[in-house]
Image (cartoon, rainbow, N blue to C red):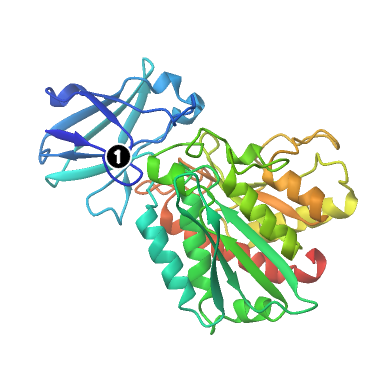
C-alpha cells in the first residue's frame, strides 16, 4: 500500500501505512502559514481492502467546524467524484473505504488542477468574442490569467467575476468552468442579450501558486489574498495587485467574488452592507439579485449565511467590500459548500463540480432577468 501526493494540488504526509485499518496521515500547512484543511492524495494497491485512513492533525485545521457532517470525496478517474464514509472522532478525521480499483484518489473537494486551468483558458480563447490576457506573474512565476468576453465599447456595462482567492476552494473554479461553457455558446439567448450590453472580465483562478502547492487559504508566501484589497503589494500579493490595476482601468458596474465555505452547508451570497456608503438602493439591489437567483435555482437560498455587518463596520481589506466602495457598484461574495446543500442534498456526490457549474449558469440568468434594476 502506497500513499502519495506529489502531484498538482496534492497535500498529505503519510506517517504509517503498514496497517490498512490504521493508515496514519497528516495534512501539511500552507507555506509560511498556520492554515490547513485541504488534502488530496492517492492510495495505491488497495483494491478490495477495507481501509481506514486517519488524518491525525484534523483538530488543528483552520475550520474544525467544517468536519461536522462532512464526507470526503473520492475518484478512480479524477473526473467523477463521489462521497465516502467519513467521521470526525477523537480529534481525528477518519475516512473508511473499500476500493473497487487498484488506485483511488481522495480529496477535501473535487480538485481543479492547474493543468485543467490551462486547458480552460485555451478553450475559452478559441471563442471569437473572447480575449485572453496575462495580467502579470505570481511569486512562483505562474501566469495571472484574465478572460474578456465581449467588445469594449462606450456605454457598455463592465462585469467582473473572480474566483479561487483561496486555492482550496476548488468549487469556485468549477463554477468558472460552468460560466465559461455558457459564455462561449453564441446560440444562448441570455449570453447574447448580456453581451449586447456589457463586457465581462473573468479571473478563473486568483491564486495559481496556492492551487498548485496544495494550499487551503494562501499564496506562495502565506498571504491570504482576500485580506489584501486595501493595499496589495508585488512582494506579498501580486495576484491582487495586478487584477486591481486592471479593474482600475476598466471600472466595475457589477462584481462577483466566488468562494467556498467549510462549515455552512448552503449556497448563499454575502453582501457588502458594512461599507461606509451602504444605502437603501444598494440593499434593494442585493435583495433582488438573491431572490431572483433563489427563484431560478433551488440549490441557492438566502435564509442562511454570514452575520451582516452594521454600516461602516466592514473589513475593507476584503475583495467585495473594497470593490463595492471603490467603484460604487453592486459587488457580492458567492459562497458554496464543501459538504452538501442541506436543503437539496445529493447522497452520492454531495455538493459537486457538476452542481457548481450549473449554479454559474443560474447566476448569469439571474443577472439578465433583473438587469434594469441592478444596472
Q: Which residue is mark 1?
A: 84
Q: Please state which of residues 13 and 83 is positioned toward the viewer in this rendering.
A: 13
In which quadrant of the rendered view does residue 130 lie?
A: bottom right
Q: Residue 298: horizontal and vertical position, in percent?
A: 57, 56
Q: Do we see residue 335 in this rendering?
A: no
Residue 335 placement, left or right of 280: left
Q: Is residue 185 above or below residue 208?
A: below
Secondary structure of the residue carrying numbered label 1: loop
Front residue of this view, candidates 86 and 200: 200
The residue drawn where x is 42% and y is 70% is 122
Q: Is residue 220 left or right of residue 277?
A: left
Decide: is 68 above or below 353: above
Q: Is residue 326 visible?
A: yes
Q: Residue 157 appears in which quarter of the rendering?
A: bottom right
Residue 250, percent from left and from top: 73, 65
Residues packed near mark 1 inside 10 Å, few (<14), some (14 to 19) or many (20 plus) = many
Q: Quadrant of the N terminus?
A: top left
**Residue 365 found in image quarter:** bottom right
Amino acid at each position: 500500500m502506497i500513499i502519495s501526493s506529489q502531484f498538482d494540488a496534492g497535500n498529505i504526509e503519510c506517517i504509517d501505512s503498514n496497517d490498512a485499518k490504521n493508515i496514519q496521515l497528516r495534512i501539511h500547512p500552507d507555506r509560511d502559514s498556520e492554515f490547513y484543511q485541504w488534502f488530496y492524495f492517492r492510495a495505491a494497491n488497495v483494491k478490495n481492502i477495507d481501509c481506514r485512513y486517519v488524518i491525525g492533525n484534523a483538530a488543528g485545521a483552520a475550520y474544525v467546524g467544517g468536519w461536522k457532517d462532512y464526507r470526503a470525496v473520492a475518484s478512480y478517474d479524477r473526473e467523477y467524484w463521489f462521497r465516502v464514509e467519513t467521521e470526525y472522532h477523537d480529534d481525528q478525521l477518519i475516512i473508511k473505504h473499500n476500493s473497487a480499483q487498484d488506485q483511488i484518489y481522495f480529496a477535501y473537494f473535487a480538485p481543479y488542477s492547474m493543468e485543467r486551468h490551462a486547458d480552460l483558458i485555451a478553450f475559452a480563447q478559441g471563442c471569437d468574442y473572447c480575449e485572453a490576457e496575462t495580467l502579470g506573474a505570481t511569486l512562483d512565476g505562474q501566469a495571472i490569467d484574465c478572460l474578456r468576453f465581449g467588445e469594449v465599447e462606450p456605454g457598455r456595462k463592465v462585469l467582473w467575476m473572480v474566483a479561487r482567492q483561496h486555492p482550496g476552494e476548488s468549487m469556485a473554479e468549477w463554477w468558472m468552468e460552468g460560466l465559461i461553457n455558457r459564455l462561449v455558446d453564441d446560440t444562448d439567448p441570455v449570453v447574447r442579450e448580456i453581451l449586447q450590453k456589457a463586457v465581462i472580465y473573468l479571473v478563473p483562478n486568483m491564486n495559481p501558486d496556492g492551487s498548485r502547492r496544495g494550499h487551503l487559504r494562501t499564496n506562495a508566501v502565506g498571504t491570504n489574498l482576500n485580506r489584501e484589497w486595501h493595499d496589495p503589494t508585488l512582494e506579498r500579493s501580486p495576484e491582487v495587485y495586478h487584477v486591481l490595476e486592471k479593474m482600475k482601468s476598466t471600472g466595475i458596474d457589477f462584481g462577483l467574488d466566488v468562494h467556498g465555505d467549510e462549515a455552512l452547508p448552503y449556497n448563499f451570497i454575502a453582501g457588502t452592507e458594512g461599507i461606509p456608503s451602504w444605502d437603501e438602493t444598494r440593499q434593494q439591489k442585493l435583495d433582488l439579485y438573491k431572490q431572483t437567483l433563489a427563484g431560478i435555482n433551488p440549490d441557492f437560498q438566502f435564509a442562511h449565511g454570514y452575520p451582516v455587518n452594521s454600516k461602516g463596520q466592514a473589513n475593507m481589506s476584503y475583495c467585495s467590500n473594497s470593490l463595492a466602495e471603490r467603484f460604487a457598484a453592486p459587488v457580492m461574495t458567492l459562497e458554496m459548500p464543501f459538504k452538501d446543500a442541506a436543503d437539496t442534498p445529493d447522497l452520492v456526490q454531495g455538493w459537486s463540480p457538476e452542481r457548481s457549474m450549473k449554479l454559474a449558469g443560474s447566476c448569469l440568468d439571474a443577472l439578465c432577468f433583473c438587469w434594469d434594476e441592478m444596472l
